[in-house]
Image: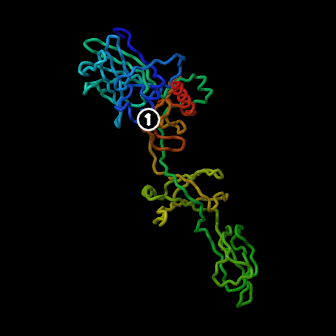
Amino acid sequence: MSNGRPLLPIFFSSILFIMTLTAHAGGNHDGHGHHGHHGHHGHHGHHGHDGHEEEHEEKGPNGGRLLSHDDGFALEMTIYEPGIPPQSRVYAYFNDKPLSPQEVTLAVALHRFEGVDNIAYKPQDTYLLGQQFITEPHSFAVKVRATYKDKEYQWEYESFEGRVVISAKSAALSGIQVQKAKPRLMTERLPVLGQVNFNQDKVRYAAARYTGVVRTLNKSIGDPVRKGETLGIVMGTDSLSEFSIKASGSGVIISKDVSVGEVVSAGDILFALADLSTVWLDFAVYPQDVPRISAKQKIKILSDGSSQAFETSIAYVAPFSDPLSQSLTVRAIVANPKGELRPGLFLKGEIEITKKNAAVTVKREAIQTFRDWQVVYRNRGTLYEIVPIELGLIDGDFVEVLSGLSAGDAYVSKNSFVIKADIGKADASHEH
C-alpha cells in the first residue's frame, strides 16, 4: 500500500444490498447495465461477522463501487452484463471529474477459492475494459493496482457470495460429508412406463368338441389347473353321452365364458388359461426416442415397493406404432416364478441407451440451487463455497458434471442442504 491509506469497503449497507439484489434479479443494474464491481450480488455469505456496524459502500455515478484516495484520485468498479458474459468496466476520476481512460493503467487480481484471476485492462470509450470475463461466482478477495501520472495506487477489499465457514465440530454434528469428484463409467438410460401382460404365447384355450348342454363346471377364474385336468362336463345333444372339457396346458384360468345348463356349440371357447411362469413387460416408447431403441438392449425394471428391481433385455420392438398415442411397444419377456409380476400392473423402466466415461461426477444429493444456478459446495478445511455446475448424464445416485468442477475437487456429498441453509442465514444477517 502506498501514498496514504485507501478506502477498504468490505460490506454493503442493508439498503444498498436490497437495491442491488433486486436490480440483479431484474436484469437492470441502475438503468445502465452496471453494478458494483465484485460483490454486486450482496451475498457475503461468510461467518466471522463480529457484530460491528457494517461500513457504507460509497457508490459512483454509474452505480459501481467507488475506491477513493485522499489526494482526489478514484476508481469506480462496475460489472456490465446485460445479455453478455459479465465484463469489468472501470471509470477513473480526479477530484470528482472523469478522467480519460488513456491516462490510467490498471490491473486487478481476483483471489478466488481455487486460484487467482489476473485481469488486465485496456482503454475503451470512457472506461477501462477488463480483457477477460468475470466468471461466476463473483466471490473473491480483490486487489486493485492503478497508476495515474506516475503515482501508484492500491486497494484491497473482500466480496464473497455463497461462502460460509463451518467449524469441523459443527460439520460433524450436522452430518456433513465431503468426498472428491471423480471419473465414473456412466450409463445413459431412457425412462419408460409400461405394464405387465400375459405371455400370449403361453395362453391356452379349452373349447367344446360337440354341441351339448353344460352339466358341470369344476373351475373358476383364478383357479390353478394342470394339463389334462377336467374343467367341466358337457352332455352331447346328438349322442346323449357326456364328454369332458380338458385343460390343454397348465396355468391359471383367466376367462370363463360358460355357465351350467348353457347350450354350447362345437368349437365354442369355454375357458382360457395362462401359464404365468413367464410374462410380457410392454413399454411405450415415443417417436423421438424410437431410433435409439433396438432388440437386446438392457432394460432395468424399477422397484415399485412390492417387488425388487431387476434387469433384463428387450426381446421385441414393434414394427408399427399405436395410431392414437403414436408410441411404439417395446417388450421384455421375463420369468415370473413367484407370481409377483401380475398382469395389469404398471411398471417403470429404464432402457440402457449407451455408456460413456464421464471425466467428473458427483453424488446427486450434493446438488442444490443458488439463485438460478445448480451448484455444489466445494470444501477446503472449514471453508465452503458454491460452484455453479453444468450437468450431464444422470445415472442412479451419480450425475456427470460437464463444467464448473474438476476431478479431485473436494465437495459436500451428503447433507449439502445444511450448507445452503447456513449461507441463507448469513445472507439474511446483512438485511438487518
Dot 1 falls on a residue whose secondary structure is helix
Residue 53 image position (x, y, % from top left): 51, 17
Residue 398 image position (x, y, % from top left): 52, 40
238 and 70: which is toward the camera: 70
Q: Given the image, on which type of amino acid does mark 1 rest?
A: Ala
Relative vertical location of residue 323 with respect to residue 312 in this rendering, above or below: below
Q: Residues within 10 Å of mark 1 (few under 14, many from 20)?
A: few
In percent of the image, x 55 and y 53: which residue is there? 349
333 and 178: which is toward the camera: 178
Residue 303 image position (x, y, % from top left): 61, 50
In percent of the image, x 58 and y 23: which residue is there? 168
418 and 20: which is toward the camera: 20
Residue 381, visible in the rendered structure: no
The quadrant the N terminus occupies is top left
Colouring rule applied to residues: rainbow
Relative vertical location of residue 91 with respect to residue 375 in this rendering, above or below: above
In percent of the image, x 43 and y 30: which residue is there? 137
| Left or right: where 295 falls relative to 225 | left
Residue 257 image position (x, y, % from top left): 67, 76
Number of marks: 1
Residue 192, visible in the rendered structure: yes
Residue denoted by label 1: 25
101 and 365: which is toward the camera: 101
